[in-house]
Image (cartoon, rainbow, N blue to C red):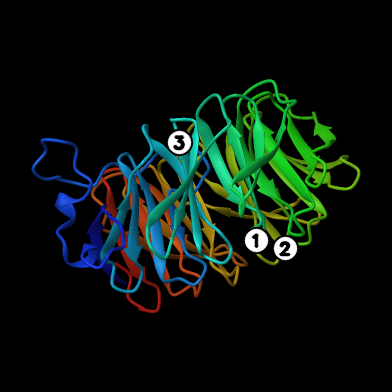
Amino acid sequence: MKKTRLSLALHTLDSNSVSQDYTQWCLPTGVKARLGKGRISDVLNPPEIAYAPDGKLIAVVSAIGIWIYNAQTAKELSLLTGHSADVTTASFSPDGSVLASAGGDNAICFWNVLTGTHVHTLKEHACRINNVVFSPSGSLLASAGDDNAICLWDVQRSEIIRTLTGHTDRVNYVAFSPDESTLSSSSWDATARLWDVPTGTSLHVLTEHTYAVSRVSFSPDGKTLASSSMDKTIRLWDVETGESFRTITGHTGRITNVLFSPDGEFLVSAAMDFDTDLRVWNARIGSLHQILKGHTRKVSSLAFSPDGKTLASTSRNTTIRLWDVQTGTHLKTLRGHAKLVYTAVFSPDGKTLVSGSSDGTLLFWDLTSDSAD
C-alpha cells in the first residue's frame, strides 16, 4: 500500500503562496517561524478532514486553523486563520465553492475556496459550535451548538433564517434529509428531533432513548432515521410519523456513531467503553449482519467508500482497518502513523484514503495498490 506522509499547514491562495515556506504563514507578531501545524481536532462525530466534492482539495481542521491541500500533489496551499479559538469542524458546499468552519469561538466562517479568502463571519450561537452541514442543494447551512440551539443560514446572503430551539442540552450533530425538506438533530438531552426546514417547525421529538443521543443518520431514500445513543442502543424511526419501529441492541459499550451505507442496505455502528467491535446491521429488519473484530482500542471514526463496498475504521491506536462490508472480511490493516489516528476519509473516486493523527500528520493511501503496509 503506497502512502504519502504530511504534517499539517496553509495560507491564502495568492500568486506567491504556493512558492512560500508554510512555516512563515499567518505567524503571530514577533514569531519567526512555525514548527508543526497544530493538532488535528479530536471531536466525537464531525469530520476533521473533508474532501472537496471534485476531489481536488482537502481541508483539515487543526488547533491553529484550517489547512487546505492539493489532493493530487499533497502540497500545502493555504492556512485559513480567523477563528479566535480552536476549530472543531469544516464542511465544503456541494459545488465546492464555499468552505464553512466553526469552533470554540461561537462563530462560523465562510471561505471562498477558489481564492482562500475569508468571506463572512456568522455569529448567532452563544456557545461552542459542534457541527456545521450544508443542505444537499448548498443553499442552506445548519449549525449545532452547546447553547442547545440549531441555526439555519442562507448561504448566498450569509444571513440567519431562523433559530430552532427545544433541546434542553447541547446539540452535537445535525443532518439534512436527502430532499432537504427535513433536518434531524441529536442532543445530550437524550432526544433526537425532526424539523421542517421551510418553516422551522418541530415535527417530532424522538424520546425513546434514555441517555445522550450521539449521532443521527438518514437513510438514502430519506424515509428512515437511525439514531445512536450512550444508552447502548440504536433506534430506527419512521421519518414521516416520528414513530420508533425498531430498537437494535448488541453493543456492550455506549454507542458513539451509526451510519447508513450509501445503498441503504446496511447500518454500521461503533461504541466505546472497551467495546472495540464494529457491528454491521441489516438496515431493513435490524438484524445483525456481521461483527468486525480486530481493533484493540475504541473506534474513533467510520467511513464508507463511495461505492459502499468498503468500510474504513480508525481507532485510538496507530492503525486504520479496511473491511468488506458484505462479507465482513478484514481486507487490510494500514500502518504508518506514529500517534493516535483520529479520522480517515475516502476521496470521491474511492482511490485514495486520507488519515490524520493526533500529532498533526496526514497519510495519503493509494488504495489501487495491492500491497498492504
Return the residue at label 1: 261
Measured along the vertical axis of the image, is residue 125 above or below residue 117?
Answer: above
Question: What separation in Å lies between label 3 and label 1 (alpha carbons)?
Answer: 28 Å
**Discs 3/1, front:** 3
Question: What separation in Å lies between label 3 and label 2 (alpha carbons)?
Answer: 34 Å
Do callouts 1 and 2 mark residues in contact (Cβ within 8 Å)? yes
Residue 250 at x, y = what percent?
A: 66, 40
> Circle 1 — which element?
loop
Locate residue 178: give its quadrant.
Answer: bottom right
Do callouts 3 and 2 mark residues in contact (Cβ within 8 Å)? no
Return the residue at label 3: 103
Task: Tell me if residue 249 can be seen.
Answer: no
Return the residue at label 2: 265
Question: What separation in Å lies between label 1 and label 2 (alpha carbons)?
Answer: 6 Å
Near mark 3 (Cα within 10 A), the count class, few <14, some 14-19 or many ≥20, is: many
Task: Tell me if residue 203 can be seen.
Answer: yes
